[in-house]
């Protein structure tokens, strides 16, 4: 049951990434994010490693996106701090989802 609770943030983070890519008309990465949700149900170490890597890259995508939008807003003389805080929180959430997904209890770790 704990595995299910640890998977919920990963699913939400992947769906947020999919929405981000979809809005940018990047349909292949959006589809990959949606397809990666299926890996949550695979009980193999490679699936967890793949998800963690994808979520870590996703956190990086959020940081790069925040940086680019901030640069555009600064150049236009628009406020950017609130956007940085929001996208920073989304990046942190995505990173925490990757971390939580890889945690294992003693019972799960002893079963191979």
Image: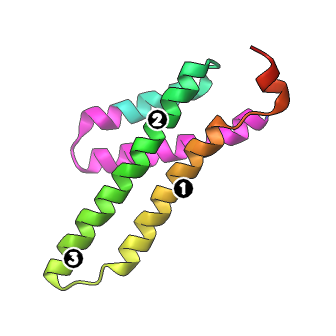
**Lower position in the chain sequence, tag 1 or tag 2:** 2
Q: Position of residue 40 (x, y in %)?
A: 58, 29
Quarter-of-image position of residue 57? top left
Q: Which residue carries the number 2 mark?
A: 53
Residue at the image point whose x is 18% and y is 86% from the top: 77
Q: Nearer the viewer, residue 55 or 106?
A: 106
Q: Is residue 106 magenta?
A: no
Residue at the image point whose x is 54% and y is 28% from the top: 49
Residue at the image point whose x is 46% and y is 35% from the top: 53
State the extent of the magenta-drawn residues as a range.
2-31
- Measure the C-alpha gap from mark 1 to mark 2: 15 Å
Helix, strand or loop for the magenta stretch, by majority? helix
Residue 77 appears left or right of 29: left
Q: Which residue carries the number 3 mark?
A: 73
Q: Nearer the viewer, residue 12 or 66?
A: 66
- Measure the C-alpha gap from mark 1 to mark 3: 24 Å
Give above or below for 63 relative to 83.
above
- Measure the C-alpha gap from mark 3 to mark 2: 30 Å
């Amino acid at each position: 049951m704990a595995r299910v609770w640890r998977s919920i943030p990963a699913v939400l983070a992947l769906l947020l990434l999919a929405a981000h890519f979809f809005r940018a008309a990047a349909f292949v990465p959006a589809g990959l994010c949606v397809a990666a949700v299926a890996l949550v149900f695979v009980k193999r170490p490679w699936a967890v490693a793949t998800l963690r890597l994808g979520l870590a890259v996703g956190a990086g995508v959020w940081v790069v996106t925040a940086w680019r939008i901030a640069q555009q807003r600064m150049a236009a003389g628009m406020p950017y701090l609130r956007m940085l805080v929001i996208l920073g929180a989304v990046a942190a959430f995505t990173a925490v989802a990757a971390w939580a997904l890889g945690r294992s209890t003693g019972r799960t770790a002893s079963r191979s």
